[in-house]
Image (cartoon, rainbow, N blue to C red):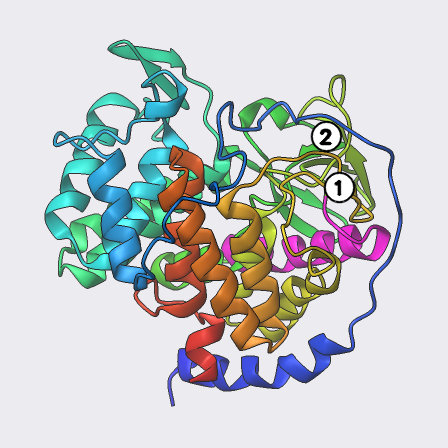
Amino acid sequence: MTRRTKALLAVVVVVAVALTAGVAWLVVGPSGPSSDEPAADATGTPGAGTPTPQARTATEIGEGFLDDWVDDDGRVVRRDQGDDTVSEGQAYGMLVAVGVGDEQRFDAIWRWTRENLVREDGLLAWRWADGAVVDDMPASDADVDAARALVLAGEAFGDPSLTEQGVDLGGAVLDEMTAVTDVGRILLPGPWAAGDGPWSYNPSYASPASFAQLAEASGDPRWSELEAGSRAVTTAVLDATALPSDWAQVRRGGSVVPLPGADGTSGTVQYSYDAARLALRYAESCTPDDVALAARLAPVLQRYDDLPMQLDLGGQSIGADQSPLAYAARAAAEASAGQHDEASADLRRADALAQSTPTYYGTAWAALAALQVEASALGACSPLEVAR
């Protein structure tokens, strides 16, 4: 029995536990958008006369994202945000291309990324616009996603050089964008956050499935340390508040304080376009304790039929934005809690909103959610696949 098969069986057991998990109900006052919120994500709902988009498979959703948002040269373009490109988008495109088995598209996206964003230290510059890098500070979530995609592509497409490049990129992340706390190693948002602590922290950047896959590919024990440390910090986050915040501060002892933004000096505390990704990243883990953390979000998010994208940390609505990511995150939490029909319905709702009100960020996460929650091509423990 393989490690992944054992993990699939173990994740099934977590469902009953997840359904009884307690939820803290700290309510925080109204807040505005976080500093990292997409500038033009999906807002509003289709009008009464808008035809309901046809339900699609995970592969079809992924292919749609690649067709609509990736140029022929491999650049993932934020067409709704000034036609720029960010490392996050390139990484999303690489993951989706692997997920749908499109080797040609993967090669194009990675080639463009390598030629335009890779820095001398091997990390990825964050933003490119008008023919040049305009912000070369790396973002760790993008680099981890890209490293994972390279490792997966190496196996899927039979190219060991891709695996090697993924291991190298991951090693640069470990060297430059992690810190050791009393509860374990954590992923810092970028090199700018390095130091002796306390540390700025984005709860949605931690990706247990990515860490496990990179650990297996590289043999570097720091990835397992990162899995354990991230789990400890995420547990602390959800023990303190019903929902995670977009940004937080981690102290050396492992305690966590919600922050209004990356540097803690602007905006207000909220669960929004960043934090919603946490459920998706933890739901696909092959470790039952991680899946149980994703499941803890379900009762709060299920208070709404039309789920707002912006909530305070107690689950109260603080904005009217509608985004595919909101429903994708709820689907991940529901699937982790064993609520498979509800999860499938929310995945379809995320895709329908992405089709009727297309945006780069919303469409990307509708595609990634379908691949993470109900498909197997990304090599983790997709909760709806486990249930089959």
Taking the spot 13% from the left edge, 29% from the top edge, the residue there is 73
Residue 141 is left or right of residue 110, and the answer is right
State whether the magenta stretch is mostly helix, strand or loop.
Answer: helix
In the displayed structure, 267 sits above or below 9; it is above
Q: Position of residue 189 (x, y in %)?
A: 57, 33
Q: Is residue 279 left or right of residue 315?
A: left
If the image is split into quadrants, where does the N terminus sit? bottom left
Residue located beneath label 1 in the image: 317
| Residue 194 magenta-highlighted | no
**In the image, residue 192 above or below residue 7:** above
Question: Could you say which is closer to the camera, residue 24 or residue 256?
Answer: 24
Kind of residue indicated by mark 2: Asp
* Coordinates of residue 136 in the picture (x, y in percent): 41, 17
Q: Magenta stretch containing residue 234, yes or no?
A: yes
Q: Residues within 10 Å of mark 2 (few under 14, many from 20)?
A: few
> Horizontally, is 306 left or right of 255 in the view?
left
Quadrant in the picture for residue 289: bottom right
Which segment is the magenta one?
222-244
Is residue 150 something that shows in the picture? no
Which mark sits nearer the N-terminus, 1 or 2? 2
Q: Which residue does the image show at 24% across and 10% down from the upper left?
A: 131
* Residue pictured at 66% horizontal, 35% vertical: 320
User: 15 or 170: nearer the eye?
Assistant: 15
User: Residue at horizontal 31%, vertical 35%?
Assistant: 90
Q: Identify the residue under disc 2.
A: 196
Q: How far from the left and from the top, in percent, is residue 128? A: 33, 17
Name which residue type carries label 1. Ser
> What residue occupies the far bottom of the structure in this picture?
1
Q: Is residue 379 above or below residue 37?
A: below
